[in-house]
Image (cartoon, helix red, strand yellow):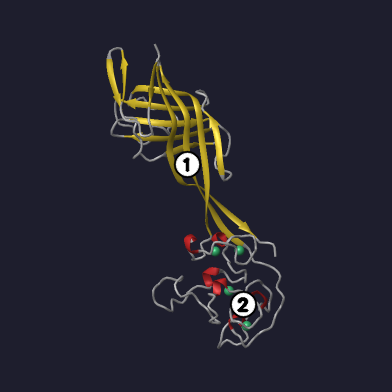
Amino acid sequence: MKKILFLFLTAILLQSCNDGDIIVTTFNFDSADLKYCGELGNYVFYKVNPEALESLSLKLGVTDSLYKTEGVKTYPINGTSNFVNYRTYDGALGDNYFCSSIPPTSPRVTVDYLASSGTAEFTTIYGYDDNDGVPGEKEFNGDTDGDGLPDIYDVDDDGDNVPTALELDILNVDGDNDPLTNPLDTDNDGIPDYLDADDDGDEVLTRDEDKNMDLDPRNDVTDPNVGADYLNPAVADSYGVNQYREHKYKIIKSVNINLKNLVLINGEEEITQETLNMGTLDNIETIDKTTTPEF
Ligand SMILES: [Ca+2]
Ligand SMILES: [Ca+2]
Ligand SMILES: [Ca+2]
Ligand SMILES: [Ca+2]
């Protein structure tokens, strides 16, 4: 008769009889980190519980770029090209057990369950970094300059062609070594320069106070005693610059792997699990983006 064992989320103690021997396994991977190796066509994700000498692994023989798009992708567990194994061993696993091209001969596998059905659900989440000196959680939740790049990944939040990083407290005037506290507010209008498209309040936009029109208002200086024209309210000439400079930012991807409706089989024995969250891999892929917003 076929034995069916149900495991609950952190599944506790699994006993199985095998020719009279009793094998006890814990099936507990909560404290184990999710790790990965492999590449297109042969992805391996695994967790190892060193205390119980057991592992849970997912192999995917798919040629998808798994994290290409944000959102959920699902892959069927078919027991052949895509499969999940739950195993116990007679010794500790070396660091490369799952990632070496030739399968190691030791430790020996003592119990081996193979999943013949179920689904692997990959949820890819994008994070952004514009490295502009304003941490993501402190960026304005919106698109200040309306250039299509939200502030969280806009290196020039106010679109004035002076990068945000150069409009903060760059001279450490307040002495706290944090460029974000007390950012420059040249015209004292209560809007910090990095969010102010007219920094000196002379009613000519900073972007337009660019005499040589090289998309950098910092090098247009009429009066060296005051500084650049965009910070000098006494100079208010507009050159009608209708262009943004090039922007760079990073997309940092993380992925969560959730196994659903898993049926693990070992001979006559069967473990079923409705959901088994393998965990999240942070920074699994980073993409460098370069773009020039349309004006
Ligand atoms: Ca923007
Ligand atoms: Ca920004
Ligand atoms: Ca500004
Ligand atoms: Ca000016």
- Asked if residue 85 lies left or right of residue 233, the reply is left
At 51% from the left and 64% from the top, the residue drawn is: 139
Is residue 121 visible in the rendered structure shown here? yes
Mark 1 Cβ inside 8 Å of ligand 2: no
Looking at the image, which is closer to me, 78 or 260? 260
Report x, y in % for residue 44: 46, 34
Q: Which mark is residue 198?
A: 2
Find residue 11 and report its image quarter.
Answer: top left
Q: Secondary structure at mark 1?
A: strand
**What is the number of callouts on the image?**
2
Crowding at dot 2, Cα within 10 Å, few <14 / some 14-19 / many 20+, comes out as many
For the residues marked 2 and 1, what is the alpha-carbon distance in whole angstroms? 43 Å
At 28% from the left and 34% from the top, the residue drawn is: 51
Looking at the image, which is closer to me, 58 or 189? 189
Identify residue type, mark 2.
Answer: Asp
Report x, y in % for residue 221: 61, 83
Report x, y in % for residue 239: 71, 78
Looking at the image, which is closer to me, 120 or 45? 120
- Earlier in the chain: of badge 2 and badge 1, it is 2
Q: Which mark is residue 9?
A: none
Query: Ligand 3, what quadrant?
Result: bottom right
- Residue at the spot of label 1: 256
At 61% from the left and 85% from the top, the residue drawn is: 233
- Asked if residue 9 lies left or right of residue 227, the reply is left
Is residue 106 visible in the rendered structure shown here? no
Identify residue type, mark 1.
Answer: Asn
Mark 2 Cβ inside 8 Å of ligand 3: yes
Is the C terminus in the top left, top right, bottom left or bottom right quadrant? bottom right
Find residue 18 and report its image quarter.
Answer: top left
Report x, y in % for residue 106: 33, 26
